Amino acid sequence: MHRVVVTGIGLTTALGPDLATVWPRLLAGDNGIAPITYFDASQYDCRVAAEVRRPPIDETGLESIPFDHCRRGVRLFLGVCREAWADAGLDADRIDARRVGVAAGTSVNYVHAGLIREHYRFRRPGATALDLPRFAAEGGTEPPFHFHRRLGEMTATVPARALGLAGPTLAIDTACAASAFAIGEACRLIARGRADAMLAGGAASLVAPVGILAFSVLGALSRNPDPEAASRPFDRRRDGFVMGEGGGALLLERRDLAVARGARIYAEVAGYGATLNAHNLTDPSPDGGAEVRAMELALADAGLAPDEVDYIAAHGTSTPKNDAAETAAIKRVYRGHARRLAVSSCKGQLGHTISAAGVCNAICAIKAVSDGHVPPTAHYGEPDPACDLDYVPNVGRQARVRAAVAHAFAFGGQNAVLAVKGA
């Protein structure tokens, strides 16, 4: 089995268009959450979000597809893939493109026809159904190539085509854990010799009327209109998450090949654990058993003892049940060492980026190992008796991080955990 390392990182969030901009702002505790500007949200329960501001995407290599009609999430993922590729310094003329692929976490299925129909009724009282063929024939909202917007595989294939890659390509839709699953499965492909390198991560852009309405109906979003207080993971006053846009990508590479070409190595992705908890659509099980198992599997896969981990990039959604259950699971796995861990959630600054949440956490863990800086949990002020660990309040800190773990616990009980360590 081959060891897998990270040689390139791409990241775009509400805090900035690239890793060089986002990372120092993340450490400083800067806030990317603001009132929604994409549409009039005055009548919605949740009126804030973490929106991305980004220059146009380089469309080189995409002349043969209708890129203008790709979902915004695909565009965001293409941008971070290009950034990770450039950061890794791979020479396109010296690689075997058949052995380099793309694994993408996607969330296209969140916005399905049923939700569109219900939103149509909400906007048009008295409407009994949405007749899509007639709607399109009469010049409605179905533009040319609109079908492409519904294909999850586009998230992976668009970057592959743009970069001329012909290796394994897969799109994974496991809700908020999708990009963590993509990273884990990409690592397995490399470890087993099926690929030499993989771009892996995900992107999401659900700051839209249907997206906000859908998660509001589920009771998952914060109703707090204050951008400085709406998302406050592990804080006693938390009442739900804030939607965030964003994308992240890692260039994963066989360690021996990266060393041979003199690549700069951030960290090794040493462990991956995945489990399912079918307890409830939105809530973790009270005992956190599936989350515990995913954490234990990742540590065992990495060959790490619990007391060798110094930092956890937590899922930390700012919902009452999730944060308490995650804290309890951490204490079950790490026991006495749990109180010596630094634990933080970036969702207080970036919002919940849904299918990009796992890769955002993975980047926090990787940078903590490589740079010795731990990002904070923003807007933390009032401790919760059920959440009693060191959550690195409000401002990041310097720390020696030998190994770190990234959590992604999704709707539907889909859990993925990644363990990284110095290479």
Image (tube, rainbow, N blue to C red):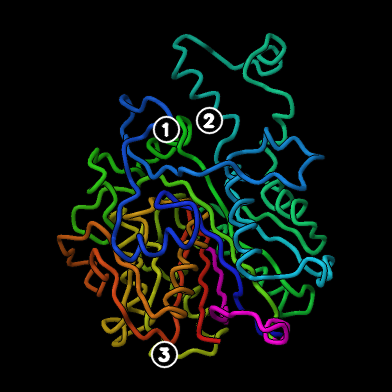
Q: Rounded to the nearest whole Å, what is the CA distance between mark 2 and mark 1?
A: 9 Å
Note whether residue 171 is visible. Answer: yes
Residue with the mark numbered 1: 213
Cα–Cα span, label 1 and label 3: 43 Å
Q: Is residue 399 left or right of residue 53?
A: left
Q: Are marks 2 and 1 in contact (CB under 8 Å)?
A: yes
Which residue is at a point 37% across and 60% down the rendered structure image? 346
Q: From the viewer's perspective, is residue 182 above or below residue 56? A: below
Q: Which residue is mark 2?
A: 115
Q: Over which residues does the magenta segment extend?
A: 256-276
Task: Please tell me the numbered disc located at residue 160.
Answer: none
> SS class of the residue under badge 2?
helix
Upstream in the sequence, badge 1 or badge 3?
Answer: 1
Give the labeled residue for mark 3.
Answer: 308
How far across and down, in percent of the image, does residue 107 sit? 57, 47
Q: Are marks 1 and 3 in contact (CB under 8 Å)?
A: no
Q: Nearer the viewer, residue 183 or 175?
A: 183
